[in-house]
Amino acid sequence: MKSYDLNLLRALNALLTTGSVTAAAERMHLSTPAMSHTLARLREVFGDPLLVRGGRGLVATPRALALAEPVRQLLAQAEALRAHVDANDLSAVRRRFVIRAPEGMSVGYGVALAMELGQSMPQSSLQFLPENHSDLSGLREGRIDLDLGAGHRLDPELVVHALSDRNLLGVVAADHPLAQGPFTVEKFAAARHVEVATLPGVEPAVDTALALVGLRRHVALVVPSAFAALLACARSDLVACAPERTARTMGAALGLRVFPLPLALPAVPLRLAWHPRQQADPAHRWLRETLLVLMEERSQSAA
């Protein structure tokens, strides 16, 4: 068998997990042609096609299915090898920490966290990824260090730290009719809305609340994040609903008007999750504890 390295095994893990060259390339931050070349190398190394065409996608061969779990365990063990560092001196740690979070969170805390990282782990770096409701295995596979977002990731396999829930507020441009004074729930429902994408099959809380009073709204635009929704409001007559801290902080910077919603809505949960294998890692513990301190300080200053 020809030689291979951990990067090749990471690519194999991504291919077996996604069953798609394109999706695996996105996970590995490679181009699709580069991932196709990697698959060709893997086939040569293991002497097996590994993934073959099946319908519109790719299906794993028996050899690939047999490799899947050992490869996953080997990658986890490799991650554990570099976790043994001096908890009192992290300056020699060389890692890229990946945090998945709503876009507003990366804007609000990314720079501050990177500055703290530069002081404690100057050889390490930080990467924020946007929320991705379709990728629920990033923590388990080690592609993500921390997952900050709504409470739908209550996976029993994960360690989940509950943070303060967030209330939703309405946001519009300064010259929008809804910003000119008192308004009714009927006027709110009649406006054109921009909505943040949710999990497939999950109805936004605003629509559920409107349905209870016999109303419906027209969602003219769906975007991936609250930050993108606020940008859309700043450039149009659309109405957005965003978590309070994001609405007030980014709304002020964009010259938007923020208003309480004329509906009884449940608070939006905010959770920080990580995989148990990272629990005792000093560098990872520093990362999550520092992020929590920054969030608490920002919360107190905004109060």
Image (tube, rainbow, N blue to C red):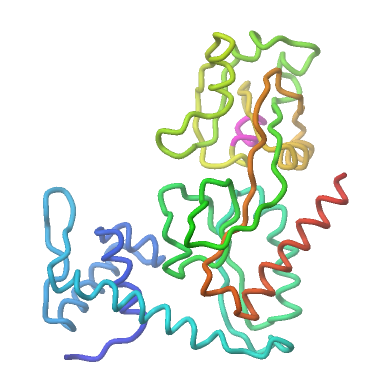
Along the line of sight, which residue is nearer the eye, 24 or 74?
74
In which image quadrant can residue 292 be found?
bottom right
When the figure is inspected, residue 99 is found, relative to residue 173, above or below; the finding is: below
At a point 77% along the width and 61% down the height, the residue shown is 294
Q: Residue at x 61, y 39 (%)?
A: 226
Image location (x, y in percent) of residue 148: 60, 55
Q: Residue at x 51, y 62 (%)?
A: 158
Q: Is residue 236 above or below residue 119?
A: above
Report the magenta residues as a range: 229-234
Which residue is at the front of the view, 97 or 118? 97
Q: Position of residue 222 (x, y in %)?
A: 49, 32
Image coordinates for residue 249, horizontal then vertical, percent = 77, 42
Residue 232, given in percent of the width and then of the height, sits at: 60, 32
Viewer-proximal residue, 7 or 70? 70
**Vertical relation: 202 (above or below) 282:** above
Query: Which is the main secondary structure of the residues drawn in magenta?
Result: helix
Q: Is residue 17 above or below residue 167?
A: below
| Quarter holding residue 93 | bottom right
Q: Is residue 102 magenta?
A: no
Dividing the picture into quarters, in which one does residue 101 lie?
bottom right
Q: Quadrant of the C terminus?
A: top right
Number of on-image labels: 0
